[in-house]
Amino acid sequence: MSIARKHPIANWLLLPPHEQRKALDKVLAFRDQSDDPMASGLPPAAVAWFWQEELPRLIQRPDVRRQAEEHLTELQYQGDELHQQINTRAGDLLERLDAIEAQVHQLQEAMG
C-alpha cells in the first residue's frame, strides 16, 4: 500500500485514501444525525456500524486481515503485560497486607 490513511474509528487500520474518506463521511453522517449538538467523540452508531458492517466487509481482503491479525497480536501482548503488572503489584500489596496483619496480631496478643 503506497499511500494509506488511518480508519477514523480503528486507527490501526490503514486504508487507501478513497476508502478512508468514505468511512469518514459515514462517521460524519452519524454525527450529523445525533440529537445532541454538544456530543463529542465518535458517535456510538458509527462505532457499531464499524464493528457490525464495515470491518466484517473489509476483513475479507488479505491486506486488512493481515492488519487485523497484527493488531490482535499486539493487543494480546498488551493484555499479557498488564496481567503481569497486576499480578506483580497485587503480590506486593498482599505481602504488605500480611506484614500489617501480623503486626496487628502481635499487638493484640501483647495487649491481652
Image: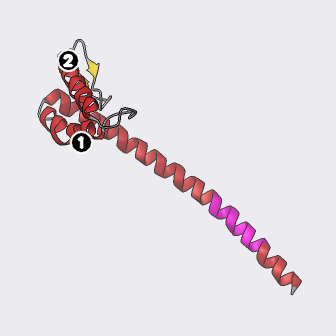
For label 1, count other residues whose C-alpha is less than 10 Å away and answer few (under 14), some (14-19) or many (20+): few
Q: Is residue 29 above or below residue 80?
A: above
Q: Which image quadrant for residue 40? A: top left
- Relative to 30, 105 lies left or right: right
**Closer to the eye: label 2 or 1:** 1
Q: Position of residue 81 (x, y in %)?
A: 46, 45
Q: Position of residue 17 (x, y in %)?
A: 22, 15
Give 91 or 10, whichever is nearer the viewer. Answer: 10
Q: Position of residue 15 (x, y in %)?
A: 22, 22
- Relative to 106, 43 lies left or right: left
Q: Amino acid at mark 2?
A: Pro
Span highlighted in magenta in the image = 93-103
- Residue labelled with disc 2: 16
Q: Hey, which residue is sitting farthest right in the picture?
A: 111
Q: Amino acid at mark 1?
A: Ala
Q: Which image quadrant for residue 19? A: top left
For label 2, count other residues whose C-alpha is less than 10 Å away and answer few (under 14), some (14-19) or many (20+): some
- Relative to 83, 50 lies left or right: left
Q: Which image quadrant for residue 56? A: top left
- Residue labelled with disc 1: 48
Kindly report the distance in space between the C-alpha atoms of the residues bearing marks 2 and 1: 22 Å
Magenta-drawn stretch, dominant element (helix, strand or loop): helix
Local SS, label 1 = helix
Q: Is residue 108 above or below residue 55?
A: below
Residue ID at (74%, 68%): 100
Give 24 or 81, whichever is nearer the viewer. Answer: 24
